[in-house]
Image (cartoon, coloured by chain):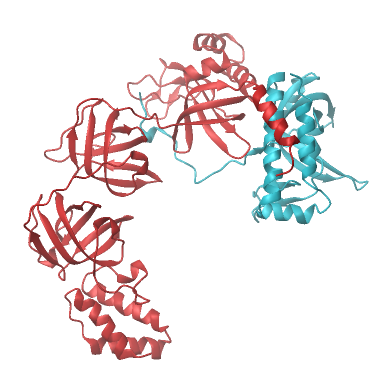
Chain colours: A cyan, B red
Amino acid sequence: MNTNARDMPRREGQFEREPARRVFAAELRECRYQFKDGEDEKSPTFVLLPSGERSNRIFIVGTLTEKTRQGEQNMFYRGRVVDPTGTFFVMAGSYQPEAMQQLAKIEPPQFVAVIGKPNLYQKPDGSWLVSVRVEAITVVDKETRDLWVLDAAKLTLDRVDAFAKEQTPDILKAKEQYPTIDPSLFRKIAYDALAQIRM
Amino acid sequence: MDYSEAAERISRKFAKGGQTPDVKKIEAKLRRLVDEFNVQPSEAERSVMNELSKEYNLPAPGAGGSAGTGGNGGTSEKKIAECVPGEWVTVEGKIVALSSPPSPAIAQSGIIADESGALRFVVWAKANAPKMAEGSWYRIESAVADEYRGITNLKIHSGTSIKEITDDRSLIPAPTPIKDLHPGIGGVRAKFVSEWEANHERMLQSGLLGDETGTIKFVIWKEPGREKLVPGTVYTVFYAQVDEFNGRLSLNLNGATILQEEGDIPVSGGETAVTGSLVHIAPGSGIIKRCPVEGCNRALSRQNYCPVHEIQKEFVYDLRIKGWLDDGEKTHSVLLQRDVVEALTGIPLAQAQEIAENNPLGMDEVFLRMRDAVLGRYITCRGREIENRLLVNACEKAAFQSGDHTALLNRAGGAPS
């Protein structure tokens, strides 16, 4: 066995990849606050979840119900991914060629796993849209979807519990930014999502 | 500020170390710093002390942060494990190892131990101290505990007095569990788990020692009288130097007492397990070609080019997956080796090779099939974490557990906690 340390690539600083948060559509849809961590051009952008956690990346599993091709020169694909609580709006453009090709290949309806970055837009009519820019999308089975519902429910409940007990900067910011949202709502949403899994 | 009193205080500290600084000079220096340069009195005191320390070739007493505030200026009797950098100490201990001094400025260096622990010590050539003998006990008064490369050591200077202790004392050191080792001097009872290639001409041997609690890398440097350890054997090692590099510990066995033991002990695989979703499959995953040169095994580029051995036409195929496993809180870099990849993707090496050689997309086709088979899936990976990357030697797909489902339903349906 060859395990010489010098054969391994050098560690590049202390790079930490942003974790992919598990969030139900019903919570993501409520996001209204987006911020940058740091002044740098390349600093990551975060969407603040109402349950008090920043999110640069999310992992969702649901049903791709439709996809549409849009644009001529700057072609991109839009899709709708449905979970037990609502709909995620996903998109992949020419800046994500791999993701776009993956999305283009999938014929809805299918269970899909999506890794992507949430972005907040205000439409001309003043309403808000949270869209997910796809990094990777792939077809999965129902068991993976069910596992995701458990995972998303668990991490949502963790956030809701922390929101009630802790005072992290993100929780304080969430209280300030979303004064009208009571995160215990997401406990009910998680319950309803779990209850939809047929045994 | 009362300069004469401060000067007295400073000179007393050095007097305890056997030096006789000029009180008048100290006072004048303090006065100059404070009156002329508006230096804070405590800072002035500190800088005078540092200056004197330098003059007497002692480590700066301010290093421990106690000198400026007066602190514990005197020398105190300590157990060896209690010595912290920046203190004047008196200890009683046994010389358990002597090593050849690395510089002519050093008369003797080695390791001194008592029942509480062990420290590396250095005797300055200028100290004119009597030679100490390995295996004997000494009382060392007014030495300085200092820090060298992040590890506490004991400096014996001209103000230190050394007396041999003649009454018979026994010293039975106890080994430390590997996971509890910290930089300094330590001992373990461990099995020689695997031998690594010596990657330096001065290196005699390197490898991995393991006990129930973990594993640690060890190194033996070439030195007359040093012998190699035998793989698979259990050893009790005392007074080895525990070094830290890039946050990882290793044992330097030169200077250590090594006893071969009978029998066998259980060894922890040093394993961690992470459950999460594979959120990214990196380029370089799938089927790869490796350099066939003995001991190289590097991944070749598409043009069959090895960074060391250049073009290799007789490459060897291998499978691997590099990616990110994400549990929603933290993302772990994972590297799956061939048998794990085969089990997880259901594509054995032979089939992957067949695809790579006959499919129009070649190796890319293998990458795409494997990506589609594992991306976004929940898996549990077990393996060793090395340089922030989990080297996975076992992996299983997560299965839906109705117990988890029920527990979560209860948790979500319960009263808000």
Q: Residue A193's x, y, as percent?
A: 78, 30
Which residue is at a point 79% across and 36% down the rendered structure image? A189
Question: Is residue B21 visible to us here?
Answer: yes
Q: Is residue B380 above or below residue A177?
A: above
Q: Residue A137's x, y, as percent?
A: 70, 27
Q: Is residue B224 above or below residue A107?
A: below
Q: Residue B273's x, y, as percent?
A: 50, 30
Q: From the viewer's perspective, is A127 left or right of B160?
A: right
Which residue is at a point 69% across and 29% down the rendered structure image? A150
Residue nearest the observer in this picture, B77 or A11: B77
Residue occupying the far front of the picture: B415
Q: Is residue B346 above or below residue B206?
A: above
Quadrant where the N terminus of chain B sits is bottom left
> So how many labels did they put on this image?
0
Question: Is residue B197 visible to us here?
Answer: no
Residue nearest the observer in this picture, B48 or B113: B113
Q: Is residue B76 above or below residue B213?
A: below
Which residue is at a point 42% across and 83% down the rendered structure image? B40
Residue nearest the observer in this picture, B293 or A191: A191
Q: Residue B382's x, y, as percent?
A: 49, 27
Task: Specify the quadrant of the image occupied by residue B176.
Answer: top left
Q: From the viewer's perspective, is B387 left or right of A188?
A: left
Residue nearest the observer in this picture, B80 or A49: B80
Q: From the viewer's perspective, is A143 left or right of B82?
A: right
